[in-house]
Image (tube, grey):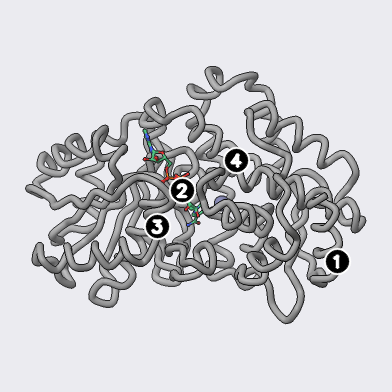
Amino acid sequence: MQKIDVQSKHGKYPILIEEGIFKQAGNWIRRWMPSSQLAIITDTNVGELYLEQLQADLKQAGLGFVDAFIIKAGEESKNLQTIETIYHWLLEKGHDRSSGIIALGGGVVGDMSGFVASTFMRGIPFVQVPTSLLAQVDSSVGGKVGVNVREGKNLIGSFYAPKGVIIDPSVLMSLPMRQFRNGIAEVVKTGAILDANLLKQVALLRDEAELRPAWGKVIARCCELKAMVVSQDEEEHGLRKILNFGHSFGHGIEQYTEYKKYAHGEAVAIGMILAAQIGQELGITESGVEEELTALLTQFHLPVQSIPIPTEEWLAAMKKDKKKSRGLLHLVAVKAMGQAVVRPVKYGIIEDFLKGVAE
Ligand SMILES: NC(=O)c1ccc[n+]([C@@H]2O[C@H](COP(=O)([O-])OP(=O)(O)OC[C@H]3O[C@@H](n4cnc5c(N)ncnc54)[C@H](O)[C@@H]3O)[C@@H](O)[C@H]2O)c1
Ligand SMILES: [Zn+2]
């Protein structure tokens, strides 16, 4: 088993990674949330596959029957309405300050469960059991939790560390291929900003069939890198911004297409290419980076070409993005593969660039 510690202002929490660890999840959860009445939050797809098994594990660990709330799978559920429904359900079930929450699912379930945990009774403990590749390599680590509102993505939320994260790569066997590729986009992001070797390793895997068995190591490396960043800058005052590489553009695309056309990682894939293009235009990014990223993303059938989006729409979405301040956008760029920089860029420059993309 691989154990990676993450430092947060409320203390350290572990990420445990091992094939088959899902079957022992109950023991770990009991250790981390001992006297709690527990509630699992999951979605329709993951619930059908893994809920009974987790409930059985918990029972075996002496935790008895655990309530479960099942949300409709998909980004459209990640809103305040669902959160409110969960609050009422928890109260009806008699949950209180001594309760604990288990997030069983992808990034949508993880972000929402964490937000519920951070606000219910002013904060109750929670554990992440991420089941999508994206959640295992990225969203379950670092304590960013929240929901989307009409005005934009993840605009409501908090920083709230889990008690622990349990990652079992074997649950990825049931993940649909499109979702698997969606997670690869965040792996490519992690490599592009922090570790060129990780990208080399991933590039050697010719197709996804080769990739699945090799996944444990890649997941562990991504967690290690993200843990290093968020342990130094939990609340994104500086270094953590680099994790947003491709995300300002990606969020604009997701919002414009109303979260329907692209999965998060797919929008981020296009966003990374746009960030590389503007980076190269501004002389921040070495030439060749865009080409290398395009080749890698294409290898995993991820989109790299933006659909035409009217510049005003794009700017409207980006202006609401958390990554801006005082008329400047913090552009996360890759200088060379594995090396990220954050540069303030004037909106006018972004606007001119986006006009070119819209044509
Ligand atoms: N908090 C963070 O730091 C952070 C970082 C990156 C992304 N995110 C957020 O994560 C979300 C995207 O996460 P996601 O891609 O996991 O989406 P998701 O949670 O919607 O999961 C994708 C799909 O895969 C299904 N699924 C998950 N695990 C499965 C399994 N083992 N077998 C079969 N099906 C399975 C889900 O039901 C869903 O249909 C976005 O909302 C994004 O904003 C958050
Ligand atoms: Zn992301």
In the depicted view, which residue is nearer to us: 222 or 122?
A: 122
N-terminal of the pair, mark 4 or mark 2, is 2
Residue 234, compared with residue 291, is above or below; it is below
Would you name the residue on which mark 2 appears? 4
Badge 2 element: strand
N-terminal of the pair, mark 4 or mark 3, is 3
Residue 123 in percent (x, y) is at 29, 72
In the depicted view, which residue is nearer to us: 226 or 280?
A: 280
Per the model, the C-alpha gap separating discs 1 and 4 is 29 Å
* Label at residue 214: none
- What residue type is disc 2 on? Ile
- What residue type is disc 1 on? Ile
Per the model, the C-alpha gap separating discs 4 and 3 is 23 Å
Would you name the residue on which mark 1 appears? 349
Badge 3 element: loop
Per the model, the C-alpha gap separating discs 2 and 1 is 40 Å
Per the model, the C-alpha gap separating discs 4 and 2 is 17 Å
Which-is-in-front pick, marks 2 and 1?
1
Q: Residue at x 76, y 52 (%)?
A: 275
Q: Kindly check if marks 1 and 4 are in contact, taking CB atoms under 8 A apart as contact.
A: no
Would you name the residue on which mark 4 appears? 187
Q: Kindly check if marks 2 and 1 are in contact, taking CB atoms under 8 A apart as contact.
A: no
Would you name the residue on which mark 3 appears? 78
N-terminal of the pair, mark 1 or mark 4, is 4
Q: Is mark 3 within 8 Å of ligand 1?
A: yes
N-terminal of the pair, mark 1 or mark 3, is 3
Q: Kindly check if marks 4 and 3 are in contact, taking CB atoms under 8 A apart as contact.
A: no
